[in-house]
Image (cartoon, rainbow, N blue to C red):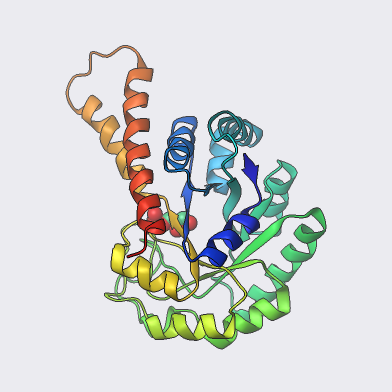
Amino acid sequence: MLASVKDILWEAKNNGYAVGAFNASNMEVAQAIIRAAAKKKCPAIIQVTEKTLSYAGDSVIVEVIKAVIEKESGSLPIGFHLDHGRSLEVVARAIELGITSVMIDASRSDLQDNIAITKRVVDFAHPKKVAVQAEIGNVPRLGEIDQNPNWDKIMTDPLEAKWLVEETGVDALAIGIGNAHDFFRERPEPDWERLDSIHKLLPDIPLILHGASDWVNHKVVEAVKRGVVCFNVDTDLRIAFNTTLCQFTHDKCDILDPRKILAEARDAVQKVVEKKIDLFRNLK
Ligand code: 13P
């Protein structure tokens, strides 16, 4: 059942567990995510990026994902979210397409600009009953900055985070505590004191952790204790999908039916999502 991302995050927050927000760029990955959530009977968030909208043709992928949610999830709450919207235009495009939770990522701008852009998005989205996630601090990805960054300089400043939330009225906040996207080398241990401070200053904001593909049990447990309610996962799903495809294309492939290959890739992604859901929910 298509459900409010905000409600899903608050349900997790109130009950001391976390959910996964998983990126989908095609039908098979969307099915894998929803099937895993349905099998585990655990709410989940499925998300798309601007690149995915452009790749698939906006309404095409949005309608496919909505149809998959409708068909495969029964009464289980599934949220649909725009990941890393970089401008008001992209956010407006997603909302126009019927996506009811959006991220505005102005984290590469300075604080004043981040606040101004985020506020403009909130003012646009909230009257339309669309929830907004902002980001403050840098969650690096490969090729963007030096592989050995000065983490103290780029992680979220707790007071700045509080300021951004108060000035903008966002519904959720993505933070940087040494986490990173894709194959970027993370800080050896996340900055737990920093996360503690953010959580103490902002006890009523669901905190989102991007770059969670390589997060293991002890990190997840510590993060949830300190207010993280959602972990974003994309890279591990891509690896599962691509590795399966490669198994067929490396050797001379005599399978004529692409559905046979895609179904295998879909199953591989589903297994990964199931493991992530267990990791985020069973916190011991
Ligand atoms: P990973 O690259 O660790 O999967 O993170 C994905 C992400 O944060 C998407 O927003």
Give percent across and percent down for residue 247: 22, 30
Regarding residue 138, the answer to whether it shows in the image is: yes
Position of residue 36 in the picture relative to residue 109 (left or right): left
Check the picture and name the quadrant holding the C terminus. bottom left
Q: Looking at the image, which is closer to me, 77 or 64?
A: 77
Q: In this view, does 181 lie above or below 173?
A: above
User: Which image quadrant is residue 2 in?
Assistant: top right
User: With respect to residue 171, does 157 lie above or below?
Assistant: below
Q: Which residue is drawn at 37% across and 58% down?
A: 282
Q: Position of residue 130 (x, y in %)?
A: 73, 55
Choose between 73 and 235: the one closer to the eye: 73
Q: Quadrant of residue 67?
A: top right
Q: Is residue 123 above or below residue 254?
A: below
Who is closer to the viewer here, 121 or 284?
284
Question: Position of 146 compared to 1: left or right?
Answer: left
Answer with the quadrant where ligand 1 appears in the image: bottom left
Q: Is residue 185 visible?
A: no
View extreme (left): residue? 251
Q: In which quarter of the image is the N terminus?
A: top right
Give the x, y percent position of residue 169.
72, 72
The location of residue 184, given as percent across then percent down, is 32, 63
Q: Residue at x 30, y 70 (%)?
A: 147
- Residue at image position (30%, 63%) is 217
Residue that protrudes farthest toward the right in the picture: 127
